[in-house]
Image (tube, helix red, strand yellow):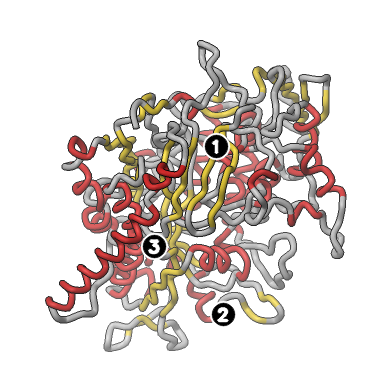
């Protein structure tokens, strides 16, 4: 929570008036309703995102927001109402008796957004030339690695409509893994994969950046990019060649245009929604009471899907490595962070109940696991998962046991007399995370730790986490889902999202002296073991063990799981709200009933 530096009530009053006027002008200028005056009246959905996308090249993307949920489809998809996989570009699939082969049959007459045929050759190209190509750094490949050998599937054309995937050993999550892998256009991308730049790298790595003209982006999803105005908005238009049709043969989706306003503050997004500029907005707990009383008058409904599928956590940089001879983390602080009692003490010192009551207004619950609560593999505290109830005395005892001590001013010092102080980063503009960070700063001061809480612009923050690797502690969130193996990229020590002890990614400078802890390696091995286990009871037991190890060693200190809520205008018909997919996961079925 931000506290004003003005001591005078009068000054605060005039500041609020000035800010309100500026905001009103800004909202009016950016209000998508004004866009209608210069565009045809068509069914449209207007929502907001917090920052600009970083790339239009799907395999090179690892961040949110991105456009790909609208612009691309894979062979199959997930139904977030039933939790089951369903046909998408593939109309059916067949799994061999030994569970080592899957043959997908494509729908007939599929097309790309430019009208070119979408064929089995595109599927083979997408996997063999891009996802499985070691010269292209993509997180997709990490999720598809199988077993200790990290072998990848082989993909081959069977005939004009069938493609066969072969895996080296049984891999329980393989079918669901393909839901997150869009098919890409060979005719538009093949040349960029086969040609190299001056450094011998595929030109594909420079293909389809955010400066690419929208009409050059070839897609197969329900929408294609129509316009992108940096820091202002992204406009999508229905893809006329999208394959879906309803029972009467009408093309889907029904909504013709989607507008994403780029709004770098959740407060501004709320103002735009209340002024009619947005059709939907995520309802954070601090907005709930305000919006709830306005539902009828404002012509919208608040959907509550219960606990969200994502996670929010604090984490320390455990990387002991050096780059160009310089430690990524100050060795003094690195010793603190790599002491498990230190991390456990921090967990005990964070008052989650106060977070729920103050920041989340009672609309949330403690999160203790990396696995989504909706997943059948989630381990609850009642089933034996270790949890960290607020306990300052226990936190102090752990610190003293680890060799820390207190001075007369109750400041925490390490065994060498160094004051315990570190910088906690998060992304600016996210009020919830800013409030959480402020409370963590206050909570940890009670056990003598000084926290320098520093919100950063999103791109600056992610650059530190993923590229420079020079940071101390962070506060961030991950999306979740039903299949734990989707998080293998986080838990594998070699994974591209192994953020608490990151190895350099392709094209980055090498790191010397990085170490992988035994418990860290054990989690990675268990994820491999669980993925090859086809017996569901045994898989659940393996994932239970991974959750127990993570909670004992705390590479990530989980905080609160807020309820998944969104406010949506009443003019939309067909909403099937889900904590897993939100309000518009079934976008192709949703209709606009009135302007």
Secondary structure state at the residue bearing disc 1? strand
Which of 238/86 is in front? 238
Which of 185/563 is in front? 185
Which of 94/128 is in front? 128
How far is disc 2 from disc 3 in space, using C-alphas?
Answer: 31 Å
**In this rendering, would 440 be left or right of 241?**
left
- Tell me if label 1 and label 2 are in contact, CB under 8 Å: no
Q: Is residue 446 above or below residue 286?
A: below
Q: Which residue is mark 3?
A: 429
Work out whether mark 1 precedes mark 3 in sequence or the reverse, and give the earlier one: 1
Secondary structure state at the residue bearing disc 2? helix
Work out whether mark 1 precedes mark 2 in sequence or the reverse, and give the earlier one: 1
Of badges 2 and 3, nearer the viewer stands 3
Which of 415/335 is in front? 335
Q: Residue at x 29, y 31 (%)?
A: 570
Q: Report crowding for label 2: few under 14, some 14 to 19, many 20 or more residues within 10 A (C-alpha).
A: few
- Can you give x and y, in whole percent of width and height, for residue 313 in the image? 42, 57
Which of the image's four quarters has the N terminus? bottom left
**In this rendering, would 191 be left or right of 537?**
right
Q: Which mark is residue 237?
A: 1
How far is disc 1 from disc 2 in space, using C-alphas?
Answer: 52 Å
**In this rendering, would 192 be left or right of 282?**
right
């Amino acid at each position: 929570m931000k506290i004003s530096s003005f001591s005078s009530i009068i000054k605060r009053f005039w500041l609020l008036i000035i800010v309100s006027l500026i905001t009103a002008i800004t909202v009016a200028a950016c209000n998508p309703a004004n866009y209608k005056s210069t565009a045809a009246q068509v069914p449209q959905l207007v929502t907001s995102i917090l920052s600009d996308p970083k790339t239009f090249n799907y395999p090179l993307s690892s961040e949110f927001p991105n456009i790909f949920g609208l612009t691309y489809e894979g062979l199959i998809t997930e139904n977030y109402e039933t939790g089951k996989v369903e046909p998408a570009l593939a109309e059916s699939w067949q799994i061999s008796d030994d569970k080592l082969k899957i043959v997908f049959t494509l729908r007939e007459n599929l097309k790309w957004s430019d009208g070119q045929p979408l064929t089995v050759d595109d599927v083979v190209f997408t996997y063999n030339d891009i996802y499985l190509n070691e010269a292209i750094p993509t997180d997709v490949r990490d999720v598809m690695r199988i077993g200790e050998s990290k072998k990848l599937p082989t993909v081959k054309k069977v005939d004009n409509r069938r493609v066969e995937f072969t895996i080296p050993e049984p891999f329980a999550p393989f079918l669901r893994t393909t839901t997150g892998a869009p098919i890409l256009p060979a005719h538009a991308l093949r040349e960029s994969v086969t040609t190299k730049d001056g450094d011998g790298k595929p030109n594909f790595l420079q293909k389809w950046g955010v400066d690419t003209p929208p009409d050059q982006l070839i897609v197969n999803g329900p929408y294609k990019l129509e316009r992108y105005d940096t820091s202002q908005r992204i406009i999508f238009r229905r893809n006329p060649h999208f394959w879906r049709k309803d029972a009467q043969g009408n093309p889907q989706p029904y909504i013709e245009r989607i507008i994403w306003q780029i709004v770098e503050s959740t407060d501004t997004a709320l103002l735009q929604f209340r002024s009619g500029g947005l059709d939907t907005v995520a309802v954070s707990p601090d907005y709930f009471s305000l919006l709830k009383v306005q539902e009828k008058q404002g012509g919208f409904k608040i959907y509550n899907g219960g606990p969200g599928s994502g996670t929010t956590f604090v984490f320390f940089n455990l990387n002991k490595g050096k780059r160009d001879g310089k430690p990524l983390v100050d060795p003094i602080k690195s010793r603190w962070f790599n002491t498990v009692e230190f991390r456990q003490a921090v967990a005990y010192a964070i008052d989650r109940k106060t977070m729920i009551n103050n920041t989340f207004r009672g609309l949330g619950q403690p999160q203790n696991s990396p696995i989504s609560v909706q997943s059948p593999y989630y381990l609850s505290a009642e089933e034996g998962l270790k949890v960290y109830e607020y306990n300052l005395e226990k936190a102090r005892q752990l610190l003293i046991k680890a060799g820390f001590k207190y001075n007369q001013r109750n400041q925490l010092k390490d065994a060498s007399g160094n004051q315990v102080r570190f910088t906690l980063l998060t992304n600016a503009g996210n009020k919830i995370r800013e409030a959480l960070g402020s409370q963590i700063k206050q909570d940890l001061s009670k056990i003598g730790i000084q926290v320098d809480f520093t919100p950063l612009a999103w791109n600056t923050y992610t650059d530190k986490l993923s590229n420079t690797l020079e940071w101390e502690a962070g506060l961030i969130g991950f999306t979740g889902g039903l299949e734990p193996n989707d998080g293998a990229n986080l838990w594998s020590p070699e994974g591209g999202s192994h953020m608490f002890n990151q190895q350099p990614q392709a094209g980055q400078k090498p790191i010397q002296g990085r170490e992988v802890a035994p418990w860290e390696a054990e989690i990675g091995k268990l994820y491999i073991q669980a993925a090859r286990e086809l017996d569901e009871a045994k898989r659940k037991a393996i994932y239970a063990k991974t959750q127990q190890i993570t909670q004992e060693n705390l590479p990530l200190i989980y905080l609160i799981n807020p309820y998944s809520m969104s406010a949506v205008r009443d003019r939309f018909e067909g909403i099937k709200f889900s904590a897993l997919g939100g309000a518009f996961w079934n976008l192709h079925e949703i209709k606009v009933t009135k302007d």
